[in-house]
């Protein structure tokens, strides 16, 4: 029997589905403002499904994301709101998403620019979280900067990397996933793969198993991160959800990661509470313990 940490599932897509609003470049940040209490309800549904780690709705709260929108200048207030929505939950992971854009390592700022921006976010999250989770990290430079920035919070750091949907041994930058392990070795408490195709993540697990840190994954259920999506200020309505990755199918795939040594699993975009509930049941049915 293995102790398995069960993450929650995707927040942004779940909010969009519940709100019924057209997605904006601010994703779940806008929904949090327009529909007070909805974020807390999603957190509660993941808790009831069996998740033991709850991720703050802060992925897209960066100054560069807010610039030129009605939410510009509300950086601190938005972090306070995100932390309030998850207050009282047992174990909280403070989420830091990428600067500039997701899946676009070419747009990531240089180290000297990025580190203080990530540090500002980490400091904003620190009072209300148990750990920092650095999400959708697409390049080695991105990993180096976000690890340096997140360190100021004085919390354990989980580094979540995103890989090529057709080759899980490579980051979305084209660099080798294996080359991220030395960067994480002394600065992170765990290394994960997130927001990538489940099939690619299965290959990633073999790479992460060669490292010394606890590892795991939480996949998305999009058909593919298309070239059309990789543009300035994209919205998720250019992506489609897979029809072959329901709760049971997702749970089966995640169990294959556990068989490779993963001890932290959950879900990302388009993976909802029903998926997490099925995964919790499958973990226990396989003889493991959810912790």
Image (tube, rainbow, N blue to C red):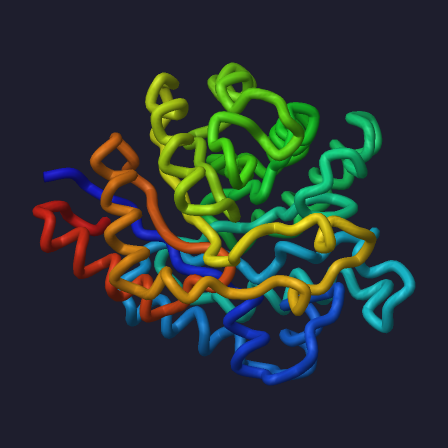
Residue ID at (68%, 44%) = 98
Residue sitting nearer the eye, 59 or 232: 232
- Picture layout, residue 63 above or below residue 215: below
Q: Name the residue: 39% across, 73% down.
A: 44
Q: Residue at position x 81%, y 34% from top?
A: 109
75 or 38: which is nearer to us?
38
Residue drawn at x 80%, y 57% as measured from the top left = 233
Which quarter of the picture shows residue 105? top right
User: In front here: 175 or 158?
Assistant: 175
Relative image position of residue 138 (x, y in whole percent)? 63, 35
Q: Position of residue 263 (x, y in %)?
A: 28, 38
Classify 234 as above or below 157: below
Where 50 falls versus 177 (above or below)?
Answer: below
Q: In the picture provided, is 232 more to the left or to the right than 92?
A: right
Left or right placement of residue 115 versus residue 248 in this view: right
- Where does residue 255 sit, x and y in percent of width and height? 23, 45
């Amino acid at each position: 029997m293995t102790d398995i940490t069960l993450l929650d599932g995707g927040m942004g897509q779940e909010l969009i589905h519940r709100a019924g609003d057209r997605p904006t470049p601010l994703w779940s940040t806008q929904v949090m403002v327009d529909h007070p209490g909805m974020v807390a309800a999603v957190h509660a549904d993941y808790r009831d499904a069996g998740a033991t780690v709850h991720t703050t709705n802060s992925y897209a709260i960066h100054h560069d994301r807010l610039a030129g929108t009605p939410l510009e200048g509300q950086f601190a207030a938005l972090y306070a709101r995100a932390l309030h929505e998850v207050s009282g939950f047992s174990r909280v992971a403070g989420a830091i998403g990428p600067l500039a854009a997701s899946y676009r390592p070419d747009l990531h700022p240089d180290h000297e620019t990025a580190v203080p921006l990530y540090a500002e976010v980490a400091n904003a999250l620190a009072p209300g979280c148990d750990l920092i989770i650095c999400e959708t990290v697409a390049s080695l430079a991105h990993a180096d900067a976000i690890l340096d920035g997140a360190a100021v919070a004085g919390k354990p750091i989980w580094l979540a990397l995103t890989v090529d949907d057709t080759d899980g041994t490579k980051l979305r930058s084209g660099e080798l996933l294996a080359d991220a392990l030395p960067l994480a070795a002394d600065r992170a408490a765990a290394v994960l793969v997130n927001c990538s195709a489940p099939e690619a993540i299965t290959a990633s697990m073999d790479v992460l198993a060669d490292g010394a840190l606890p590892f795991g994954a939480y996949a998305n259920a999009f058909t593919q991160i298309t070239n059309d999506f990789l543009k300035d200020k994209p919205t998720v309505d250019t992506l489609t959800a897979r029809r072959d990755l329901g709760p049971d199918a997702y749970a089966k795939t995640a169990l294959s990661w556990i068989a490779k040594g993963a001890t932290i699993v959950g879900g990302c975009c388009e993976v909802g509470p029903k998926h997490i509930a099925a995964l919790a049941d499958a973990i226990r049915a396989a003889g493991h313990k959810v912790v």
